[in-house]
Amino acid sequence: MQKPGKKLSFLIAGATVGALVLSGCSGAGSSGSGDSADNTITALMVGNPQMEDIQKLTADNFTKQTGITVKFTILPENELRDKVTQDVANQGGQYDVATVGAYEVPIWAKNGWLHELSTQANADSAYDTADLIKPMVQSVTGDDGKMYAAPFYGESSFLMYNKEMFEAKGLTMPEKPTWAQVAEFAQKLDDKKKGVAGICLRGLPGWGELFAPLTTVVNTYGGTWFEKDWTPKVDSPEFKEATNFYVNLVKQYGESGAPQAGFTECLNTFGQGKAAMWYDATSAAGTLEDPNASKVAGKVGYAYAPVNKTEYSGWLWTWAFAMPKTTKKADAAWKFISWATSKDYEQLVGKNLGWPRVPSGKRTSTYAIPEYKESAKAFADVTLGSIEHANPQNPGVQPRPALGVQFVGIPEFADLGTKVSQEVSAAIAGSTTVDKALADGQKLAEDVAKKYK
């Protein structure tokens, strides 16, 4: 069997497709690492709230303490994946630090594209690697048992719902809802005349956008991208049932503009009180509970990811800081990474920006901080429970040939997942059908399977 870590062309192709999906906006001071000053490093980050927070805090804290200036580039998720992949895979050397995820790290570590970080982390007793939550460490660990990125925050997925809207209709959300119950709630709560959707679900193309939540639905409906022997199952009855359910749910009771809605758009929609429910990343809760950023702070309930045939269905992910092998400023880069992923940084965020904004899900000690426990009491237990029950080895009802809950841990999945997502998004828009989308996806999956059988 061909080793998945060597399939560079497919990985780059997948990232390039992602770049076509959405144009980006960069943060202040975006620059390449051509800056030869030893005290300046460049960092490429995904444009999520936690990364925007660290950009705000770096100059007055990290730079003031170390003298190291950090020039940030912040991009939307799809464009971030494309840019970081092309830079790292092509040995471009533009960035000293980059945010990457649980999908990329094991593959890139195998290819020798990243610095291992275990040596520095273990040598620093204050960093306390033993405090890092094990599933998050495992997701950024290479075949050699070493850590190739440091988790900045960790997440699973869960269902968020507006308690006031539920109470107004006399509805009660179970701790572990089924998708059938969610659909019933969405129908009862949808009120387009008032500008309120029954549910917000990602419809934006991208393997890490639309197919992050959708693949968890496929898993719990009994479907899979590939069986253990690499038989592709994209057009199987179970995959079709799950996809039809998802597409119909968002078409009937979802947010307006769903084919262009990703994580950020749903965060804004739900946070503005424009949706009764939202199924997405557990990391969203911190922003939702911040009254400075959300109109629904204190009004949100949290339940486990909806299921059908499985007991749990939440995904497992971490956005982590990695150091490309091409950096010439490894010492300065590690100082930034260790600061950004430390216990002290969490205290800094809590005291300066508010405890709900702490980038959680990566350290056990976070859940012992009294102020954080109080601020996160609505969602902390469900978040930890979701992370602990996420099973990358066995996320569905059948054995899998590669690791991953919301993705398949092979380089080709970036291309495969993105192409199929484009057609599913088109089905949400009404310009094609789920059957056609998945029939085309099956052919693409068959091409991938030939390389592994």
Image: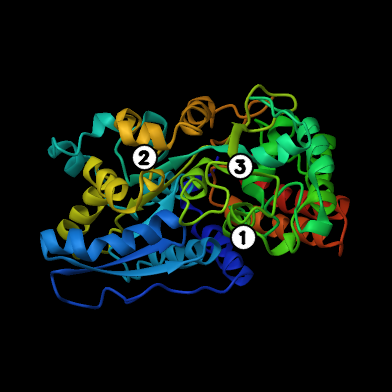
Q: Is residue 138 visible?
A: no
Task: Using residue 186 as the reference point, say whether residue 125 is left or right of it.
Answer: left
The kind of secondary structure element at disc 1 is: helix
Mark 1 and mark 3: span between their CA atoms?
A: 37 Å
Relative to the observer, which residue lies in front, 112 or 216?
A: 216
Q: Is residue 151 above or below residue 294?
A: above
Relative to the observer, which residue lies in front, 213 or 18?
A: 213
The residue pinned by badge 3 equals 452
Identify the disc placed on residue 142: 2
Q: Within 10 angstroms of label 3, few (less than 14), some, or many (20 or more) residues?
A: some
- Give the x, y percent position of residue 340: 27, 51
Relative to the observer, which residue lies in front, 26 or 302?
A: 302
Task: Using residue 4 as the reference point, say whether residue 148 is left or right of it.
Answer: left
Q: Amino acid at mark 1?
A: Glu
Q: Amino acid at mark 3?
A: Tyr
- The residue depicted at 68 percent of the width and 32 percent of the height is 306
Indicate which disc, 1 or 2, sits on the residue closer to the N terminus: 2
- Give the x, y percent position of residue 52: 39, 61
Q: Is residue 76 above or below residue 437?
A: below
Identify the disc placed on residue 265: 1
Q: Amino acid at mark 2?
A: Gly
- The residue depicted at 17 percent of the width and 64 percent of the height is 63
- The residue depicted at 60 percent of the width and 35 percent of the height is 301
Q: Within 10 angstroms of label 2, few (less than 14), some, or many (20 or more) residues?
A: some
Indicate which disc, 1 or 3, sits on the residue closer to the N terminus: 1
Mark 1 and mark 2: span between their CA atoms?
A: 33 Å
Q: Are marks 3 and 2 in contact (CB under 8 Å)?
A: no
